Image (cartoon, rainbow, N blue to C red):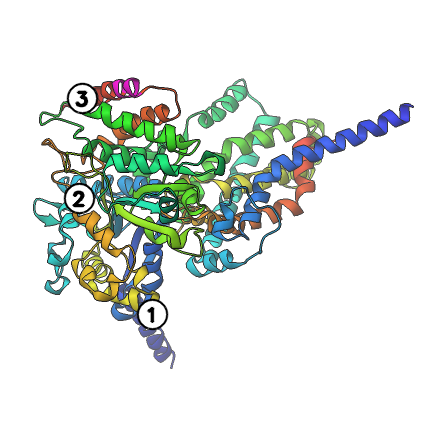
């Protein structure tokens, strides 16, 4: 009896989990389906689901009209660059806050988070003007710095949480064995915090990849990443949903694949602490 | 020997640097409309002829407007050519943000530009943006449904004709709505349409002293009429419908009539996308019986050069190419006359080959019926037909648009919507110092 309840429960849980998963994934699924339809099918009412003449026409048009590889390259550099740069700053910062906290550490952590509480548009003009002065408009380096700064609080917070769970005694033991600060961070702390660092890196790449406010406002032609590529397929006069879906699918495909392959690390990093 | 090598190397570097310095690149900001995309596709011809490279920045309309405004107001210098509309051109020209196009060569033939377009894109007698394509608005209707209803659409209908036709064609059981018109809030969305209705009913946004006039009986009559049309014969959820939503409905056979941009004609008659392609007729935008002003707007997507560009001469060369008579011929040769950007040049409409395009004549008549300098029955201090060419318009147009959208959604009566719009426009204009 008890056994059947457990099985029933399990089945129910699985069904609920699948249901939630499907709801969450549905917009992406719909985008992918739409990208294989004609413009007329894309807006058909009632909507067509799976039984239509699948076409690659939208992908052909998008390939022909836009230089996809250039947008992709910009996205990789900006997302990758801002993550690497961010980690170089965030790891030592999180280390010091976790292992040598001062009276002000808590305040500093909260203060860093407070920068996320202002809507981005509130600082658009100051940053735009600074970018003009420094000649950083429409450059990859400018965008890399801005995205790094935007995601830095999240990076420090995440790493801080992981580092906190590593027993200080292990680091102490390393120090007693004669390890300097550099060795301590590089050879003792980092390997133990790998799951946490990996999930921070992945999450940050995803955030930077999808960032669409600064990337649209601070770029024109040369440094425009995939978000600008997607935005170029919306039209005020004329149907565009199928082509827009094709462009979106192409833009999210790399990050989706990366996420798929690294889901183990991502889930582990996000659900467990650094040391079990 | 060593010297020889280094000499060769330094000469090579010098040559590469020099050629790099001479290879000019223009950055062009534009929208994703069919005609612009076609221009992008054909622009390799320009590069081949002049050696000037082109970088395209294609953006969604609202993002484009925000980006180019931001760039031009802060002298960001990111764009050498911008695609702007009739609303921005006179305002930006007055502020000295645009380069005058007086420098275009003689054979560009400015006198060939349709007078209404030229008037809307000029400031102080100088052209500041060259029309790439122009549009007015007109009635598109289903010839089969009209025939079934035993009605005939006059070429110059009145609002009474439109209402009668809408009533006759509405068939709720078969999901056919008599009329589809814009309801979504926005200065370029529902307010473009409502303002043209108001113009045709004898209303105006401001009197000659810039006092808001939305409390006038003409406005009430116009807005009540618009609201009744949508409530009685419009599609469900009309408060969210803009150009693309109505295009979709019309192409699927859900609308008896659609009053919107003339550029839509090529979409609804395209058999690849439209289920009613062979059953569409065209008529001029309506007027009210006894009044001459018709409810048609005037808009152009035009190319302009921001002041402060380092490449004014090359930009001028590109505009000369993209908006010339030769360009129209080029598109016709490659893609057929139906795909030529409409509404910019007189010579296009004098061309017998273009006359065979089914919507050519009605587009020209609609554009010619629009006069941006005299948009209303009573005199007004502003330029613009479906907009008021002042910087405050984007704000007040959008706020007022939200009230009218709420009215269409059934949350406000026409009287309430107008009273609220009047109040917010008055406040805004007082704050702006009018």
Marked residue nearer the N-terminal end (2 or 1)? 1
Residue B107, image x, y percentages = 12, 65
Mark 2 Cα-neighbour bin, 10 Å: few <14, some 14–19, many ≥20: many
Report the residue marked by disc 3: B216
Check contact, mark 3 vs mark 2: CB within 8 A. no
Query: Magenta span has B307?
Result: no
Report the residue marked by disc 1: B13
Residue B80, image x, y percentages = 25, 52
Query: Foreground mark, 1 or 3?
Result: 3
Measured along the vertical axis of the image, is residue B381 above or below residue B58? above
Q: Nearer the viewer, residue B76 or B273?
A: B273
Q: Which residues are magenta?
A: B414-420
Discs 2, 1: same chain: yes
Q: Looking at the magenta stretch, what is its main secondary structure?
A: helix
Secondary structure under the numbered disc 2 in the rendered image? loop
Residue B238, image x, y percentages = 40, 32
Residue B368 left/right relative to A34: left
Give the CA distance from mark 1 to mark 3.
73 Å
Report the residue marked by disc 2: B370
Residue that sits furthest to the right in the current view: A1
């Amino acid at each position: 009896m008890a056994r059947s309840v457990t099985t029933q429960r399990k089945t129910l849980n699985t069904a609920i989990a699948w249901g939630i998963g499907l709801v969450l994934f549905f917009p992406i699924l719909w985008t992918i389906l739409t990208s294989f339809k004609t413009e007329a099918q894309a807006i058909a009412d009632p909507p067509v689901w799976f039984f239509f003449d699948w076409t690659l026409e939208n992908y052909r048009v998008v390939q022909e009209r836009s230089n996809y590889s250039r947008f992709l390259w910009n996205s990789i550099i900006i997302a990758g660059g801002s993550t690497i740069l961010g980690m170089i700053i965030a790891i030592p910062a999180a280390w010091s806050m976790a292992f040598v906290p001062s009276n002000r550490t808590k305040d500093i952590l909260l203060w860093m988070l407070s920068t996320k509480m202002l809507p981005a548009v509130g600082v658009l003009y100051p940053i735009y003007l600074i970018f003009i002065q420094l000649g950083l408009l429409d450059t990859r380096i400018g965008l890399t710095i801005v995205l790094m700064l935007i995601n830095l609080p999240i990076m420090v917070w995440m790493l801080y949480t992981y580092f906190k769970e590593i027993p200080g005694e292990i680091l102490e033991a390393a120090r007693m064995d004669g390890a300097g600060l550099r060795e301590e961070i590089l050879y003792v702390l980092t390997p133990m915090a790998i799951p946490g660092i990996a999930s921070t890196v992945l999450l940050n790449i995803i955030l930077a990849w999808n960032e669409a406010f600064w990337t649209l406002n601070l770029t024109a032609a040369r440094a425009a990443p995939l978000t600008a590529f997607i935005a170029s397929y919306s039209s005020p006069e004329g149907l565009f949903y199928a082509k827009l879906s094709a462009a979106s699918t192409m833009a999210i495909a790399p990050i989706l694949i990366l996420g798929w392959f690294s889901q183990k690390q991502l889930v582990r990093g996000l659900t467990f602490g650094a040391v079990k | 020997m060593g010297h020889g090598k280094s000499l060769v190397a330094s000469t090579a570097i010098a040559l590469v640097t020099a050629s790099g310095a001479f290879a000019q690149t223009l950055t062009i900001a534009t929208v994703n409309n069919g005609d612009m995309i076609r221009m992008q596709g054909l622009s390799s011809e320009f590069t081949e002829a002049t050696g000037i490279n082109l970088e395209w920045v294609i953006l969604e309309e609202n993002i484009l407007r925000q980006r180019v405004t931001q760039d031009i107001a802060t002298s960001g210098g990111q764009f050498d050519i911008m695609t702007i509309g009739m609303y921005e051109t006179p305002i930006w020209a007055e502020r000295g943000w645009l380069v005058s196009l007086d420098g275009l060569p003689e054979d560009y033939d400015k006198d060939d530009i349709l007078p209404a377009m030229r008037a809307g894109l000029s400031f102080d007698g100088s052209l500041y943006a060259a029309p790439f394509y122009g549009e007015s608005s007109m009635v598109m209707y289903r010839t089969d449904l009209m025939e079934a209803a035993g009605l005939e659409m006059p070429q110059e209908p009145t609002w009474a004709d439109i209402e009668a036709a809408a009533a006759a064609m509405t068939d709720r059981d078969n999901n056919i709505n008599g009329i589809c018109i814009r309801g979504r809030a926005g200065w370029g969305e529902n307010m473009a349409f409502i303002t043209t209705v108001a113009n045709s009913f004898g209303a105006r946004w401001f009197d000659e002293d810039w006092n808001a006039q939305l409390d006038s009986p003409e406005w009430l009559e116009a807005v009540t009429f618009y609201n009744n049309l949508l409530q009685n014969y419009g599609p469900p959820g009309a408060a969210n419908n803009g150009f693309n939503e109505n295009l979709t409905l019309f192409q699927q056979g859900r609308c008896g009539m659609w009053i919107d941009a003339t550029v839509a004609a090529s979409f609804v008659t395209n058999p690849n996308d439209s289920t009613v392609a062979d059953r569409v007729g065209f008529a001029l935008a309506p007027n009210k019986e006894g009044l001459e002003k018709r409810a048609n707007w005037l808009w152009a997507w035009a190319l302009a050069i921001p002041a402060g560009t380092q490449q004014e001469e090359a930009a001028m060369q590109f505009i000369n190419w993209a908006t010339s008579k030769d360009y129209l011929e080029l598109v016709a040769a490659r893609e057929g006359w139906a795909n030529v950007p409409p509404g910019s040049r007189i010579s296009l409409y004098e061309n017998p080959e273009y006359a065979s395009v089914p919507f050519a004549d009605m587009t020209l008549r609609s554009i010619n019926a629009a006069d941006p300098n005299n948009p209303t029955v009573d005199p007004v201090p502003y330029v613009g037909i479906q907009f008021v060419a002042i910087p405050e318009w984007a704000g007040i147009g959008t706020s007022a648009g939200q009230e009218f959208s709420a009215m269409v959604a059934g949350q406000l009566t026409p009287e309430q919507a107008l009273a609220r719009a009047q109040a917010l426009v008055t406040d805004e204009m007082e704050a702006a110092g009018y």
